[in-house]
Image (cartoon, rainbow, N blue to C red):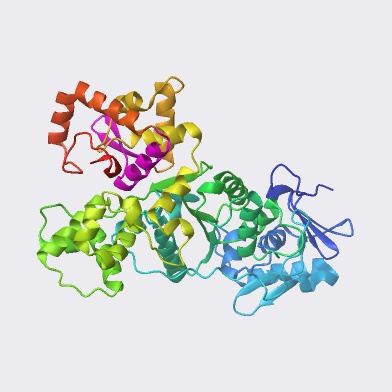
Amino acid sequence: MNYATADSPTLDPRTLVIRLGHCELDLGARALRRDGAVVELGSRAFDVLATIAQAAGRIVSKSELMEAVWPDTIVEENNIHVQLSAIRKALGADRKLILTVSGRGYQLIAATPDALGTALPQPGSAPEPTPLPVHDALLGREDAIAEVRAMVASARVVTLVGAGGIGKTGMAREIARQLAAEQAIDVRFVELAAHDTRSGMIRAFANVCGLPAAGNEPDLRSVASRLAGIRGVIVIDNAEHVVQHVAELIGLIIYANPQVRILATSRLRLRVAHEVVYRVGPLELPDAGDSRDAILRSPAVGLFLRQWLSNGVHADLSGDRLRVVGEICRRLDGIPLALELAAGRASVLGLEGLCEGLDEPLLYLAGGYRTAQPRHRTLRAAFDWSFAMLDADEQRVFRRLSVFDQAFSPEAACQIARDATLSSQAVMDCVGELADKSLVEIQFEGAEVKYRLSTPARAYGREKLLAEGEICMIFERHASYVSEHLPKLAIETMAAKPLSSSWAVQAPPFMRA
């Protein structure tokens, strides 16, 4: 007998044998057996039974059966009743395992797939979809959400990639909420931030698909088989720190069920088959010379003001105040987490006091929601989370690149970051990894590529430079590079829109007199 087991290299639905009481449904041989003897069952009836059995205890609607068994044919609903009658006759004493759920469809109960080794739920005990967390309405993400929704409709795996605090989770939740409300599909939400091991990750998925937490720990393939029965979207939040294990699980799920869709958030790509990446960027910022109305239309300003006013601030939003708000948002690069934390500080320090303190944003931006994940309660914690995922060479290159106040070229990166043990090629390999992990931004100026660190990322990197005792050496190296390329840098800076008041070398606040 060709049973699938937990030790099989892949979970191939074509070789899966599902036990139905005294009967066995062999999907590979397309055969139904009772006590080892083949029971006669027509082709359509077998397809109906297989569709219900592979749903892993989930109720299968009539329309779903029609689509699976008669995909290109218009048939009467009575055909399902005819096939079910033949199935129940073939099952004999086990006919009651096929349950008719009035007005909803059909369900296989008390079946045991040998590949899972886990009993399916009893009637009415199928796991309910995960309640989606409630959050404030998103600002400035309408176009991005529409684009990602279109991607989810056509791609099997969509990954929202971006820096910590950029708003990936909020977008994923809103997309899931819209899909569940408008299309009435099954949406499961898996939060992985608190799980940093393979077993913890498996347990998190097991919880949302209804596998019991007690007893033996669920096997990865058992969880994958259960999730493969979902006809909807699985939302996976914060996958970056267990990305290898998540990728393995997703590979099993999409192999077993081409209809399930995966929407993941991560600071780096999953690198799985069928993956489409959407890079989440910062919120739109106002220009320095914008009018009052234009400033108020900026999503970054809108988020800051909403958070600021929610802290009990009652202030006149005069033109001068709004210009300060716009400057704060620009200095924080429109990063939603940074804006929310800054708004909390502004309610204590005032707008002008906060703006002055943003020379050292990591010291000022703290005090996030008590219910937030620890990595989102301070700006430093958000970077600690990302920095810990880097290897030693990537950490070294990241902190050295923090001396650049402006976008920089590959040549500049190599001259600043390389050393006796780190070649130019190794530096660029690290830059590529840092970009993939959302710590370095890539910009294209015609055919030329440039790189850039956000203002908070630069502040964090300079702290690391100081801690490693490299800060004087790297700033001197940067000063030397600037002096060698002074005419070219001056022209480029004048042509570009600067991010700060000076393009020259600027030491961090803790090095200034």
Location of residue 282 in the rendering, given as x and y in whole percent from the top left corner: 31, 52
| Foreground of the two, 471 or 73 | 471
Q: Is residue 475 above or below residue 329?
A: above
The picture quadrant where one finds residue 136 is bottom left
Location of residue 507 in the rendering, given as x and y in whole percent from the top left corner: 26, 38
**Position of residue 373 in the picture relative to residue 197 (left or right):** left
Q: Is residue 469 above or below residue 250?
A: above
Location of residue 197 in the rendering, given as x and y in whole percent from the top left corner: 62, 50
Q: Residue furthest top?
A: 420
Going 35% across and 51% down the picture, which residue do you hit? 362
Going 18% across and 64% down the picture, which residue do you hit? 296
Location of residue 344 in the rendering, given as x and y in whole percent from the top left corner: 31, 65
Q: Is residue 382 above or below residue 462?
A: below
The answer to whether residue 293 shows anywhere in this view is no
Residue 465 colored magenta?
Answer: yes
Q: Which residues lie in the magenta part?
A: 440-469
| Foreground of the two, 166 or 78 | 166
